């Protein structure tokens, strides 16, 4: 076996799963779901960085930095139990 399933390796599968969870979370109606979504988004960023680095995709690496900052901001703005004005 070559390490691929349906044309994707395990890192791509994790990116797919975490990306879907992120999108469902950040579009949630409650703060808890949005916080969950942004937190999952942060967890996926090292995978994006690794696969972009392996393939010399420097633009994706810079976008990874931008997305990481945005996910941190999203977590900060949706902290549990705190009112954001």
Image (spheres, rainbow, N blue to C red):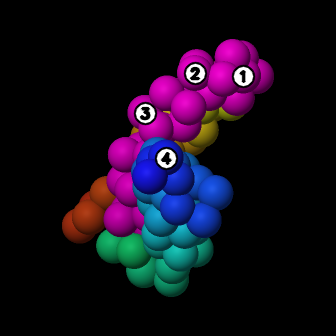
Of tags 4 and 1, which is closer to the observer?
Answer: 4
Disc 4 from disc 3: Cα separation: 23 Å
Badge 3 marks a residue whose secondary structure is: helix
Disc 4 from disc 2: Cα separation: 18 Å
> Going from the N terminus, do you reach mark 4 or mark 3 first?
4
Q: What range of the chain is rendered magenta?
A: 34-61
Q: Mark 2 points at which residue?
A: 54
Q: Name the residue under label 3.
A: 46
Of tags 4 and 3, which is closer to the observer?
Answer: 4
Q: Name the residue under label 1.
A: 57
Badge 4 marks a residue whose secondary structure is: loop
Q: Are marks 4 and 1 in contact (CB under 8 Å)?
A: no
Q: Mark 4 points at which residue?
A: 2
Badge 1 marks a residue whose secondary structure is: loop
Disc 1 from disc 3: Cα separation: 14 Å
Which residue occupies the foreground of this view, 8 or 76?
A: 8
Q: In which quarter of the image is residue 35?
A: bottom left
| Crowd band around label 1 with a 10 angstrom C-alpha radius: few (<14), some (14–19), many (20+) | few
Q: Where is residue 32 in the image (x, y as percent from the top left)?
A: 33, 73
Left or right: 71, with 64 as reference point: left
Q: In which quarter of the image is residue 59?
A: top right
Of tags 2 and 1, which is closer to the observer?
Answer: 2
Q: Are marks 2 and 3 in contact (CB under 8 Å)?
A: no
Left or right: 40, with 2 as reference point: left
Measuring 70% from the left and 29% from the top, which residue is drawn there? 60
Of tags 2 and 3, which is closer to the observer?
Answer: 2
Disc 2 from disc 1: Cα separation: 8 Å
Q: Position of residue 22 (x, y in %)?
A: 50, 63
| Crowd band around label 4 with a 10 angstrom C-alpha radius: few (<14), some (14–19), many (20+) | few
Q: Position of residue 11 (x, y in %)?
A: 46, 46
Most extreme residue toward the bottom is 29
């Amino acid at each position: 076996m070559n390490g691929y399933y349906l044309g994707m390796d395990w890192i791509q599968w994790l990116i797919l799963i975490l990306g879907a969870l992120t999108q469902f979370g950040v579009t949630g109606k409650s703060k808890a779901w949005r916080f969950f979504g942004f937190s999952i988004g942060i967890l996926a960023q090292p995978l994006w960085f690794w696969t972009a680095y392996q393939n010399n995709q420097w633009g994706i690496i810079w976008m990874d930095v931008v997305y990481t900052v945005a996910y941190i901001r999203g977590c900060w703005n949706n902290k549990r139990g705190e009112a954001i004005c």
